[in-house]
Image (spheres, rainbow, N blue to C red):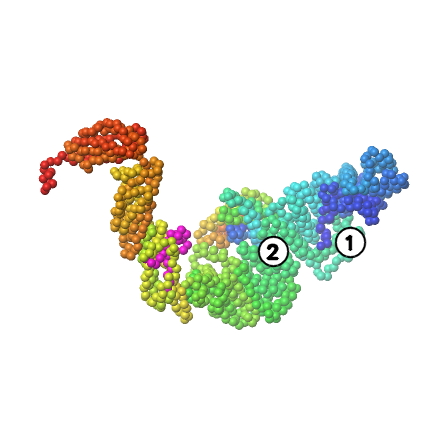
Amino acid sequence: MSPTQWDLPPELCCRPMAFVALTGLDVVYNAIHRAIWDAFCANRRADRVPISFKVLPGDHEYPKCRTKRTSYEWYIPKGILKTGWMNKHLNLVPALVVLFYELDWDDPQWKEKQSECATKVEIVRTSLQGRNTKVAVVLIQKKTPLPPGEDLVASERASALCNACDLSGKSLFVLPHTDHLVGYIIRLENAFYEHAQTYYYNEIRRVKSHKEFLNKTTHQLLFVRHQFKIAFFSELKQDTQNALKHYRTAYSLVHELRAHETNMLEIKTMAGFINYKVCRLCFQHNTPLDAIAQFRKHIDLCKKKIGSAELAFEHTAWMSKQFQSFGDLFDEAIKLGLTAIQTQNPGFYYQQAAYYAQERKQQAAHLCNHEQSTSYPSPDPLETPSGALDFYGQRAWRQGHQSIDPPDPEREKAGILALQVKEKGVLHSELIIALLSNAVAQFKKYKCPRMKSHLMVQMGEEYYHAKDYNKALKLLDYVMCEYRTERWWTLLTSILSTALKCSYLMGYIKDYITYSMELVGRASTLREEQKSRIEKNLIKVLMNEAPEPEPDCDPASVKAAQAHWIDRGSLDKDNLFTIEVQDYIPFVQCKAKFLSPSFHVDDPVQLHVYLKADCPHPVRFSKLCVSLSNQEYNQYCHVEEPCKAKDILEPSSQANMCLIPGKTRKYCFTFVAKTEDVGKKIEITAVDLMLGSESGRCVYLNWRGGGGDAASAHEAVQAARSFKRRTRLPEQQVDWDTVSIQTSTMIISRVPRISVQLHHDPPALTNEMYCITVTIQSEEDTVARDVKVTAGLKPGQDANLTQTTHVTLSSTEVCDDTHPALLTDIPIGDLQPREKIERSFYVRCVSTGSRIFLFHVSYAMSTTVEGKEITCKCHKDETVTIETVTPFEVAFKFVSIKFENLDRVYVDIPFLLMMDILSMSPWPLHLVSSQLQLAPTMTAIDRPQSQVEGVVLQTSECASECFCLKCPPVLNGTSTVASGQYIISWKRKSAHAETPVVNSVIILPHVVVEAIPLYVHAELPSYGRVRESLPVRYHIENRTGLVQEVEMSVEPSDAFMFSGLKQVRLRILPGTEQEMLYNFYPLMAGYQTLPQLNINLLRFPNVSSQLLRRFLPARIFVKPQGRQADASIAAA
Amino acid sequence: MAVCIAVIAKENYPLYIRSVPSQSELKFHYTVHTSLDVVEEKISAVGKAMADQRELYLGLLYPTEDYKVYGYVTNSKVKFVIVVDSSNTSLRDNEIRSMFRKLHNSFTDVMCNPFYNPGDPIQSKAFDSMVSGMMVQAC
């Protein structure tokens, strides 16, 4: 796009850099000069000083300097800023002119060269007459210079040259073109930069010095101009802080100017320029908030300064540009590292720019609607002698004119007309779209999806206005779904209406149908009569006719469109359209459902399709078909009724294939599922509804799955939540909201007509062969063939259970680990109707806990469904949870002969092992026998014989037995020895006779065996009699290999008198036994404590008499004295 | 006073929109719809843990040349949006807050109506007249 009047001039937008002119360089033919020039200008990085270099010929004519005014007294300025001024100082008037000259210090023709150089300097000086531009000379030398001070010739000649050229020593440089060219150049340009800075500093002072001559009445414009110039020179000097300060002053001064219609444009233009500079510098100083505040202020100040009403579009164009250029600045700052946020990003400025551009377009349309005959005024009032304006923002036909009223009303009129005619030629839409797309890009970046969509809609609408319907459609179609999913129907309707117009004008049949469908549907907020109009058009399209044009379309485009439609109509092909509607909200709603989530294979599958139209007029369709996941069933699920053309136009509400608006229509389908599909799912993959006719044009509305569209899910939720009482509908009519979609159904096997009963006596006992009897009875009317039973542990339980459960059919053997946990497919054969069969299973559970057992009976049979013979496989599962409990608990204890509990036993001293068998089983237990298997470390005193054989234990009864044992000597004094095991053979009492006996092995506990040095035992009668002698013999046995010294004493007792050694000390030889005889004489009857025998071993003090007393009886029963009568009683 | 008042459902579809009849209704719909961008962003900026203590009033959502858009989100994520004319500088933040409070109270009354199905467009007369009171009177 060529730059327009509103674009900011490039010299304003660039970054001002000091301008240095290089002369005396022949960059075309001289390789050395070329290299020097390249070193100056090529690859300038950011760290080099900001200078713009230019190569100029030595005799270049610089712009003439006007004679300086000594007084401003009679001077009336003609405008604020000359259009050429910025460019002049950027590109024409250098801050420094550098003359390059090839001259070595030892040049043989030194004199001649010196004067030639002086002449060249003179020429440059002359052409810079009146300017403060500095001149410098660079001598290009072949030789590397000596360090300063050493070359006497050089310093002498240098000062001579300076004199000749009238240069200060600081302005003479030497450039040896040796290896380090770039290094020298960098040093050179730093020196140039200093000179340039001084130049601009002087320029600023010069401008400032004018101030005292100005007065506020006539020189208002100059105040602005001078501040602007100071600021601009400051920028050239790279003093941006001062530049900003002066631009700000200039900005406030510009608004102090007397504004009237004739100079409004000039003021706004300059205000815009200065504002641009201020914002730019604020961004550069990283104070974006200042920039934004300045811009807001600027807009607030200028918004109302419309200027001439006839050129109102100029104001909006200017406003648009202001926003756009601020957006550009903002965006540029972001690229340089500024962070923007969602609510403050360049997008808003582009959007506003677009808004003003739209405004401009409207104003232009309003103000520039001249008659065709109006021609561009001649002579062209916009023509100026120089081809450009002298001052920014002035009118070409009255340049420099500063009075309030236009000097020539006729010329003014012609000028305005010229501008209006020009404005007419502007491609507004293009501008608007460019701005909008800029804004879209920004909003995309700052997470504003809705704003982005809105702008895209605007773009689409703008394309529509620009008659680029194709692009408009693309954009609108792209954003439509967002409004649809967010359920903003008003907005969707508006977008759809535009899209419909586009598709009509382009003759896109499918799009036209799609949009119409949605616009007449329930999501549309159009009024009824509009819906009715669109529906009529839709019907026309279905009949292969051209629709009526949409209202408010461009007449020329309508004409073209009508031709399109007629063309389309004549084509035979491409008249079948499939529209996938579940992402739209079409005017026909569809819900398909299987009546049940599962069907038995011997029942027909039932499928209902509900249709409802939301359009204003009834619609007629010609075909409805349902596609299922198994396509073989599709043939059963369609209705078709080819319709004649007139039916489409005037559908009779009675017809089956006619949808009355607002009424729900139901279509029922049934089919018989195939036996192969048992256990499979049947799904509705699609529902197709055909509108129109195959002969004309037909449209398939295709719903994926069981119907429903973009809005139906939400509607279903709302309907479900609603408390509204449903109005009672007459027979055969359904309330739409109550219908729910059921897209799939399961085909399941036929219900078995067979009874499976289990008989067993829970709980099971650990390790027993638990019997479960299965009774199967057929209730079928025909033979059940191929009956099979699977029995055992239900799969899917704890893996340990599989290891500890075994199932068998045979009752005779006890099963072991080789038997499986589940017996599969045990053939039973055929079952006649009413036949009954019984099978027993034996289960052995090794561990306790509960288990689930499964009995699965399967069979096949034939049946007829709706006249079709099918073979059905049926099965029945029966599960039972069985608890396994321990049958009994066995407790052991070691006791002494006196039935005292022992924590240890003594070598060779007999003790008793007692078992208590406690029944835990709820059922009576039959203990068949028991057996003690002793370890070699233990011997029985006599032949151990089971004492519980044949005992029957009821629940929580206890059986005990006891064995007398002793331990042979052990190696070292004490050790823990194994005792052996105890085997109980048992079975359930109530169980069948044939139940096998179960042997439960119980490991006996270990016991501590200890050797003792001395053993004492007493020999005494079983009872005594009062006043009859009772002889007691104590045997004291030395079990060690040493001679034992024993101290013995008998304590007196009230119940006995006794004779014998009361206290004695004796020695017992190893392995021998000492016998002590006492005669006790009981004095009292009853259980009497025997006189206590104390034994002390002098050698083994740790063997206490307490321990030894254990082996001795403590009491004895004393009978009373016999009487004579007793004998007679006994005799009797 | 407001030029447009909207109630937006949790799922971001409009439950109620009322704007001054003098200007394009569609434009206000777009304004309210686009302001949801900022609302969403503001809600998500508040962390999950802090969600309970979140202030309902969201303040100025974004300024346009012509309008100021204010937002308010209830704890059940129903949004209220009030659009005010930019030229109306006399309106203070406090007044906007009290408008939102009134709106919220009235909305609560609507929700308490056993015959109102949450999620349906609001058609309450009481709510309507309350909103009318807050709107700029078209003259």
- The residue depicted at 36 percent of the width and 51 percent of the height is A846
Measured as percent of width and height from the top left, residue A685 is found at 50, 63
Measured as percent of width and height from the top left, residue A291 is found at 66, 43
The residue indicated by pointer 2 is: A457
Q: For this rendering, which residue is in front, A468 or A775?
A: A775
Which type of secondary structure does the marked residue at label 2 adopt? helix
- Magenta span covers which residues? A787-811
Relative side of A1089 to A625, left or right: left
**Callout 1: chain:** A
In the drawing, what numbered circle is on residue A383? 1
Relative side of A465 to A523, left or right: right
- The residue depicted at 82 percent of the width and 45 percent of the height is A32
Task: For the C terminus of chain A, give its image quadrant.
Answer: top left
Relative side of B19 to A35, left or right: left
Q: Is residue A527 above or below residue A343?
A: below
Q: Is residue A22 above or below residue A707?
A: above
**Callout 2: chain:** A
- The residue depicted at 31 percent of the width and 34 percent of the height is A1012
In the rendered image, is residue A768 in sight? yes
Q: Residues within 10 Å of mark 2 (few under 14, many from 20)?
A: many
Q: Is residue B31 above or below residue A225?
A: below
Q: Earlier in the sequence, mark 2 or mark 1?
A: 1
In the rendered image, is residue A75 in sight? no
Share a chain, discs 2 and 1? yes
In the drawing, what numbered circle is on residue A128? none
Tell me the kind of residue under disc 2: Val
